[in-house]
Image (cartoon, helix red, strand yellow):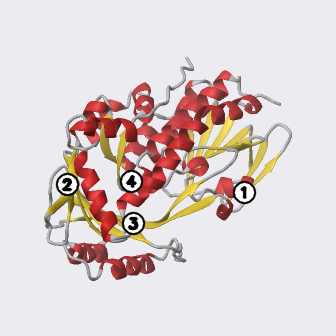
């Protein structure tokens, strides 16, 4: 098989630019294509730790990420009257994770990774892949707007709803496992309640509403709703998505009336089913997948961005090690990461249930367990067991 040099990467989120950075560093010629008209900003706040943090260190990103990020002091769970009924401080996390832990808006993380590329990587915004035709030693790619081009390799780093996965592997329902929840994220300016560096969450059976105060007077909200059947709402129907959330929280206490008022003001809304992507193989011939396109653990897993960076780093490294031969590099990439990802995926199912237990008893148990994270020794043990990454990153030179 012809050794690869040119690589088209679909998606300029987390995985795509990470992969492009390492490929360019190893002498490949990557190009990025992104269907959004510009780099996506904002988004929800993600906790960033583990092996993904190690990748960021190798990219010299950590000082900038610490400046952009937030040092969360506490996760506070409240009841309908606003009284604290659960939660924990973050001291045990920082201690057991060796201070390799920060919270950051996903868009800020993406911006920093993309900034490492400089002018070394061609990027096309506002376009997407429409067809792939694999040839003996290349892939002919047709685009929505640009003229067709030939590349040695194509990588789908285009998220949960990957167009590359659909074209090369088949329809999304074949690989999606819905976990029984929907999640929504939005941000507004001027929300009246602020608890600096505290993630405040209200829980009722089958749902959760949470807020976090950002800089510049903004507040980001994170809503979760249990739904046994996946809602049939168009991805572009913001009015329909808002109506689902209004119906879910219309009769709830705490700050839910004010949060719904803020929702009415929000010009942008992220709304999606909480799902996992499960593929037997993350590659086919000259096409591979990375990040959520290959192994989405779900929005509630907590490490999707870190996994995306790990995947980009390992895929680029294995291509370097194989001299650009995808027949060697792709299986090595999957073999190295899949046991780790499968373990984290199983954990993610449990995490999803903890965000929005469906019964009052489940809520009480969740709240009680959360308080144990503050207990001496026991909290450290729980953090070590549930959150530490047992993955040694390869050294590719």
Q: Which mark is residue 41?
A: 4
Tell me what residue is drawn at x 15 percent, y 52 percent: 196
Q: Which of the marked residues, 2 or 3, is nearer the chain's N terminus? A: 3
Tell me what residue is drawn at x 59 percent, y 51 percent: 293
Tell me what residue is drawn at x 72 percent, y 57 percent: 167
Name the residue beneath numbered marker 2: 216
Q: Which mark is residue 167?
A: 1
Which of label 1 and label 3 is nearer to you?
A: 3
Q: Residues within 10 Å of mark 1 (few under 14, many from 20)?
A: some
* Quadrant, the C terminus: top right
Residue in front for this viewpoint, 286 or 32: 286
At which x and y percent is residue 120? 53, 32
Q: CA distance from mark 1 to mark 3?
A: 28 Å
Disc 3 secondary structure class: strand
Disc 4 secondary structure class: loop
Q: Which of the marked residues, 4 or 1, is nearer the chain's N terminus? A: 4
Q: CA distance from mark 4 to mark 2?
A: 15 Å
Give the residue furthest to the right: 136
Name the residue beneath numbered marker 3: 184
Displayed quadrant of residue 340:
top right
Q: Residues within 10 Å of mark 3 (few under 14, many from 20)?
A: many
Q: Which of the marked residues, 1 or 2, is nearer the chain's N terminus? A: 1
At which x and y percent is residue 395? 54, 20
Q: Which of the marked residues, 4 or 3, is nearer the chain's N terminus? A: 4
């Amino acid at each position: 098989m012809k050794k690869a040099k040119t690589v088209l990467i679909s998606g300029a989120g987390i995985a795509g630019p990470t992969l492009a950075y390492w490929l360019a560093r190893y002498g490949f010629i990557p190009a990025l294509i992104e269907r959004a008209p510009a780099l996506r900003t904002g988004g929800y706040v993600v906790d960033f730790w583990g092996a993904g943090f190690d990748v960021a260190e190798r990219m010299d990103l950590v000082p900038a990420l610490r400046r952009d990020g937030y040092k969360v002091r506490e996760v506070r769970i409240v009841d309908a009257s606003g009284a604290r009924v659960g939660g924990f401080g973050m001291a045990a996390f920082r201690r057991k994770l060796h201070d390799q832990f920060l919270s950051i808006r996903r868009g800020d993380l993406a911006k920093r990774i993309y900034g490492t590329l400089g002018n070394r990587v061609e990027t096309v915004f506002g376009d997407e892949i429409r067809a792939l035709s694999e040839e003996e030693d290349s892939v002919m790619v047709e685009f929505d707007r640009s003229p067709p081009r030939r590349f040695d390799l194509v990588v789908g780093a285009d998220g949960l709803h990957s167009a590359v996965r659909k074209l090369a592997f088949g329809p999304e329902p074949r690989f999606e496992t819905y976990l029984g929840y929907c999640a929504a994220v939005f941000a507004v300016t001027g929300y009246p309640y602020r608890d600096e560096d505290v993630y405040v969450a209200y829980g009722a059976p089958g749902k959760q509403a949470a807020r976090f105060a950002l800089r510049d007077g903004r507040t980001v909200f994170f809503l979760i709703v249990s739904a046994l059947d996946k809602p049939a709402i168009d991805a572009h129907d913001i009015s329909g998505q808002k109506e689902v959330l209004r119906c879910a929280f219309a009769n709830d206490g705490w700050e839910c009336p004010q949060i719904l008022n803020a929702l009415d003001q929000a010009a942008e809304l992220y709304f999606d089913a909480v799902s996992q992507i499960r593929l037997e193989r993350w590659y086919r011939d000259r096409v591979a997948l990375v990040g959520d396109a290959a192994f989405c653990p779900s929005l509630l897993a907590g490490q999707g961005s870190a996994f995306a960076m790990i995947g980009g780093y390992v895929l680029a490294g294995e291509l370097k090690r194989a001299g650009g031969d995808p027949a060697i590099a792709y299986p090595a990439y999957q073999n190295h990461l899949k046991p780790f990802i499968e373990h984290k995926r199983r954990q993610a199912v449990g995490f999803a249930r903890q965000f929005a237990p469906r019964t009052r008893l489940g809520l009480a148990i969740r709240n009680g367990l959360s308080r144990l994270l503050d207990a001496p020794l026991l909290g450290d043990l729980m953090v070590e067991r549930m959150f530490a990454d047992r993955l040694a990153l390869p050294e590719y030179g």
